[in-house]
Amino acid sequence: MLQEVLEYIHNYFRKESHQGTFTISDGAISPAVSLKEGQRFWIIGSDLNDGVYTLRADGIRDDDDNEAAGLHDETFAGTICALGVPPAVLALTAEISEWVANNSDAVNSPFQSESFNGYSYSLKSGTGTNGGSGQLTWRDIFGKRLERWRKPYV
């Protein structure tokens, strides 16, 4: 979810970029890039590993904190960017993830349902922000709060 949020605000909070040829083998990157434990980084230009990851003491994790789920062995010419994502953005991303988990059925449904006094009905949703379904997405709910970090798209 973090990568999706950073893409939405057009801001990865880049601190330092390292360009070159990198090899990923058994969850390790060489040549080594200077990162602190807990720091996020962004791999760009890889055929198999593009994305945001976190360096943990027990290994590299993807942006949803899954243990090296997306790291595949390869050699690629690209960029690895050290990121400095503010704690407030990380906290808001956790809120967004929770909202998505709690509302995914409604967001993905093409119907709006309502029930009262033992009577219920469903209507096909009209046009709206979620690909025409009319349902609110996390962008609708949290967009205003993310606005302060949003950069113009270039």
Image (cartoon, helix red, strand yellow):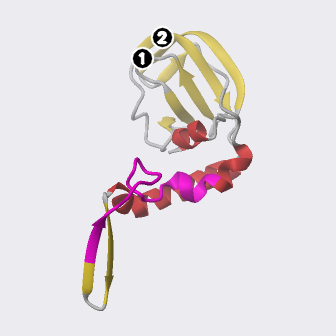
Question: In this picture, which residue range is highlighted in magenta?
Answer: 121-143
Element type at marker 1? loop
Q: Viewer-proximal residue, 122 or 95?
A: 122
Whether residue 93 is situated above or below residue 153 in the rendered picture: below
Q: Position of residue 88 (x, y in %)?
A: 69, 52
Label drawn at residue 103:
none
Q: Residue, x 29% and y 67% (percent of image)? A: 123
Q: Position of residue 47 (x, y in %)?
A: 42, 17
Do the residues bearing badges 2 and 1 touch, measured as CB atoms within 8 Å?
yes
Whether residue 11 is situated above or below residue 125 in the rendered picture: above
Q: Is residue 80 left or right of residue 67?
A: right
- Identify the amino acid type marked 2: Phe
Q: Viewer-proximal residue, 143 or 135?
A: 135
Q: Position of residue 91 (x, y in %)?
A: 63, 55
Q: Callout 1: 10 Å neighbours few (<14), some, many (20+)?
A: few
Q: Which residue is mark 2?
A: 76
Q: Which residue is mark 1?
A: 47
Q: CA distance from mark 2 to mark 1?
A: 7 Å
Mark 2 vs 1, N-terminal side: 1
Q: Is residue 112 left or right of residue 143?
A: left
Q: Is residue 79 left or right of residue 122?
A: right
Q: Residue, x 31% and y 58% (percent of image)? A: 109
